[in-house]
Amino acid sequence: METLLNLAHIRIIATIMMVVMATAVIVIRLKASRKPITIKKIIMPPLGMSTGFLMFIAPEFHIPVLWGVVAFAVGWLLFSYPLIRTTHFEVIDNEVYAQRSPGFAFILIGLLALRLILHEVIEQYISVLQTGSLFFLLAFGMIINWRLFMLRKYREITDTPAQKFNKKK
């Protein structure tokens, strides 16, 4: 009984933390659109998130490789798509900015809701920690694809002849 109570607490805390983190991401992304984009700002989030792979050192987080590949692929192919579709850049005073998308916050909230629903379903079949592993890989696949798209678009904008000319000045 005590173990079930502890598991319930872990689930509640994890859900609350997920909502807090999602809210923080929305606020940070909305504020970020007021500052110029740089390659460093595009690359740092996935690099910081990659430290999460350390969880796989603990055997409790281990999952079959196929499950991990599928989770990563779902993040890469499905969850990143709405973020990619709503990410646009503009050049203002020779600096690149992310355009504010009116649907961006709603997309993040929708992805969070979908993730919470999937989390509840999957958690019935595997442990809470293994579920965390799957959703980490899903999120990592999503952010890697989205940030690679951002990097490509940023380079397209900054590598135009006009931009190269302005860099030399």
Image (tube, grey):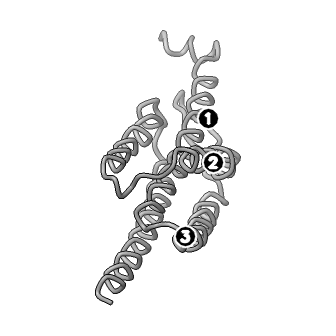
Q: Quadrant for residue 3, please give it.
A: bottom left
Foreground residue, 135 or 38? 135
Q: Nearer the viewer, residue 157 or 17?
A: 17
Residue at image mark 2? 80
- Secondary structure of the residue carrying numbered label 3: loop
Task: Return the disc, 3 or 1, that comes first in the chain's sequence.
Answer: 3
Cα gap from disc 3 to disc 2, whole angstroms: 25 Å
Secondary structure at numbered mark 1: helix
Q: Residue at x 66, y 59 (%)?
A: 102
> Is 126 on the left-hand or right-hand side of 53?
right
Q: Position of residue 125 (x, y in %)?
A: 54, 70
The image position of residue 38, as x and y in percent, is 46, 32
- Which numbered disc, 2 or 1, marks the residue closer to the eye? 2
Above or below for 123 versus 167: below
Please give the label number shown on residue 125: 3
Q: Are marks 2 and 1 in contact (CB under 8 Å)?
A: yes
Is 69 above or below relative to 152?
Answer: below
* Amino acid type, mark 3: Tyr
Q: Which amino acid type is shown beneath numbered disc 1?
A: Phe
* Front position among marks 3 and 2: 3
- The residue under label 1 is 149
Residue type, label 2: Ser
